[in-house]
Amino acid sequence: MQKQLVITVTGNDRVGIVDDVTKIILAHEANIDASRMARLGGEFAMLMLISVADARRAALEEALNSLRSQGFELAIRPTEPSAAQNFAGWLSYQIDVRGADHEGIIHQVAHGLAKQGANVETIDTGTEDAPFGGLRLFTMTATVLAPPGLSASDLQDELDVIGDKLNVDITVAALND
């Protein structure tokens, strides 16, 4: 029987981290079902959903724990595929945010989404230099699941209020699943 684990690995960035971690996973006949990996500042962070045979799980966890001796922080959490069914029938939207960078943008957008009952699936953020004026531009792309009764236009209306307050542009687009 297959088990799923959510694994996070963080530590000082260096060449070969992904190679080292995936070698351990492969050696235990596990599969990476989904992942996000990024260098953030001088740190490297990995977030993975792993499938592994129940009989191999303990050995995989023990091998992954060896990363701690290399200075990495590690978290392993079992999950159940049935948990994803909690949002069956919900609508998928992409939220894009762009504007001058300042504190509180992520929080205010996330708060507005939560008020509408939308569940955040992913958020990717960053900053870049504006073409003119020496400002930093903030960018955010999020995927959210909204209850079946929440339309894209209702979600856009709520986020327009937030965007006006924060002086950022926010767009909502329905995603086809």
Image (cartoon, rainbow, N blue to C red):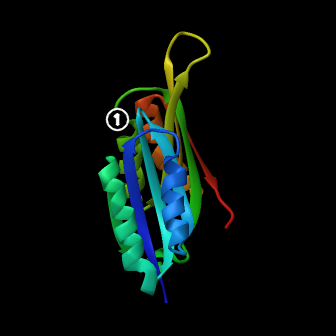
Give the percent coordinates (x, y) of residue 168. Answer: 50, 31
Relative to 94, 86 lies left or right: left
Hey, which residue is sitting farthest top in the picture? Answer: 133
Camera-nearest residue between 76 and 172: 76
Relative to 73, 174 lies left or right: right
Camera-nearest residue between 33 and 27: 27
The answer to whether residue 148 is seen in the rendering is no
Q: Secondary structure at mark 1?
A: loop
- Relative height, residue 75 to residue 124 (above, below): below
Hey, which residue is sitting farthest bottom in the picture? Answer: 1
Tell me which amino acid carries mark 1. Gly
Query: What is the quadrant of residue 34 in the picture?
Result: bottom right
Q: How many marks?
A: 1
Q: Which residue is mark 1?
A: 104
Hey, which residue is sitting farthest right in the picture? Answer: 176
Camera-nearest residue between 107 and 40: 40
Give the percent coordinates (x, y) of residue 116. Answer: 41, 58
Give the percent coordinates (x, y) of residue 151. Answer: 56, 61
Camera-nearest residue between 86 and 128: 128
Give the residue drawn at x 55%, y 75%: 29
Quadrant where the C terminus sits is: bottom right
- Relative height, residue 26 to residue 101 (above, below): below
Query: What is the quadrant of residue 107 in the picture?
Result: top left
Give the percent coordinates (x, y) of residue 146. Answer: 50, 64
The answer to whether residue 109 is seen in the rendering is yes
- Relative height, residue 55 to residue 118 (above, below): below
Give the residue drawn at x 53%, y 60%: 22
Instruction: Please tell me how crowded label 1 is: few (under 14), some (14-19), or many (20+) other residues with Cα within 10 Å.
Output: few
Give the residue drawn at x 36%, y 78%: 58
